[in-house]
Every structure is written in C-alpha cells, then in structure tokens.
Amino acid sequence: MPLYKKFLDGVPDYLARYYWWAYLWRWGIWFFDHQSVINAILFGQYDTLLKKTLAQVETRPGAKLLQLTCVYGKLTPSLLSSTGNEVYLCDAATGQLQLARRKTRHVADRCHLARMNAECLGYRSDAFDQVIVFFLFHEMPAEARRNTYAEIARVVRPGGSVLITEYASTPQHHFLYRLVPFRWLLGRLEPFLPGFWREDVAGKLGEALYHKGKNLSGEPSVEYSFAQFYRIMHFRVEVLSAGQN
C-alpha cells in the first residue's frame, strides 16, 4: 500500500498524496510550525506578508470572519488579537485543528474550530463578513480550487470581502524563477503551483460569485511583496444588479 494512504483518514486525496509529510505526519506538523522554518520557506517574507494581510482584515465590531484552513505560524492568534471579532476556522486535517487550538486557548470563546473540507463547507450561505485565505490555493489541483471558489462565493455575504494572500502570477522576471534548478524543485514540492501561477484569481472568483447572485465590487486591491513574487488581494463583494443578470 502506498505510504500516503495511511494518512487519508477523511482528508482530500491530493492532500494525503502530495502533502502528507508537511500537514498530516505528526513530525512534519512539529517541524513546519517553527517560525524560522516558515520564514525560510517564504524567503524571509513571512512577517511582511502577515502584516500586510492583517492590515486588511475586517475590524468592524460584530463582523464574522472565516479563516479557510489552518496555517503554520502566528496568523490565527494574530488575527484574533487584531480584530476582537469571532473567527471561524476550518480544516480537513485533525492534527492542524489540534495545533490551532493549542495556539488559541486564551481566546477559545472567539475561535470556533470545525473539521471541514474547503470544497464543501457546512456553513450557511451569506454567513461571513470576510473570508481569509492564506497560501491555500497553490496547494490545490484546479478542480479543488474551482470548488473552493464556489464555496467562498456562497458563504461570503454581499457587502463583505475576500482576502487572499498567495503567490503572484507567473514571476517570469524574478531572479528565483529564472533559476531553472530552483523552478524545477519548487514544482516538485508544490506540484499545483505552476497551474495556479497561470490562474486568473479575480476571474475565477468573479465567476463563482456570479453563479451565487453576487459580484465583485470594483477592482480588487492588490499589494505585492518580494519583487512581485507574492501578493495580497482584497476583493469587495456586492449583490449582482439586475442589469448584470
């Protein structure tokens, strides 16, 4: 039996097949949650990306936030500290949820954890004022991304927003991308990244919103980091007007 099948336990097949060592194996969870390791993976940009992400988090009192899947590092506790609002956090992996709970015990009353696949959320429609996605899409195959866009479009309310921190479009002129051995290695470790590099995120999200009777409100706010290797995208959501049907 292939090793990855020992880690399936209700998680998506692609997650177990390609990322068991990083997100499902207990020693992998221990190793990758060290801040120095995370920062190295992001080429020293973690704190910058975190700061720029938190600067666009919804802080209006009473807003309900959804963090779509757990992430390593201090995003979740920082998010809870910066908003004072309720944060709903879901992930398909039990080990990731256990890690998140250990980090948020001091604010457990405002951090609601649930085991869910991002492609099929159990939350009601129009439940959240903001959906936050931090380095998730590049680790998903195209179909999983499409399903996740659809679920984001369903659960975010009109007047709310979607905040996505991710790799930027194909960085053809970035010095790292131009290093062929590095590009090959990154493609091996992140097999879905080349496809995500080419994806029109605004177009995919906009299409998903359209099917839910919603629309992007104006142009998204996009902020870049590390010579446009990474980006923080902030999308506003509105009701689809009659003329757009």
Image: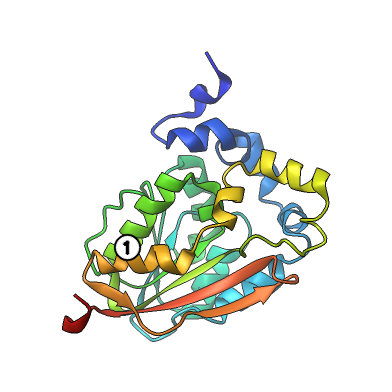
Does residue 91 lie above or below 217 as drawn?
Answer: above
Q: Using the image as rendered, state which of residue 209 and residue 152 is in the foreground.
A: 209
Q: Position of residue 237 (x, y in %)?
A: 34, 78
Q: To which quarter of the image does residue 4 belong? A: top right
Position of residue 88 in the picture relative to residue 81 (left or right): left
At mark 1, the secondary structure is helix
Amino acid beneath label 1: Ala
Q: Residue at x 30, y 76 (%)?
A: 215
In this picture, is 226 found above or below 105? below
Viewer-proximal residue among 39 and 136: 136
Q: Left or right: where does residue 56 sit relative to residue 37?
A: left
Tell me which residue sits at (47%, 64%) in the image: 201
State the residue at coordinates (45%, 29%): 8
Identify residue for label 1. Answer: 208
Q: Where is residue 123 in the image (x, y as percent from the top left)?
A: 26, 58
Picture layout, residue 227 above or below residue 243 = above
Residue 170: percent from the left, percent from the top? 65, 60
Q: How many residues crowd mark 1 within 10 Å: few (<14), some (14–19), many (20+)?
A: many
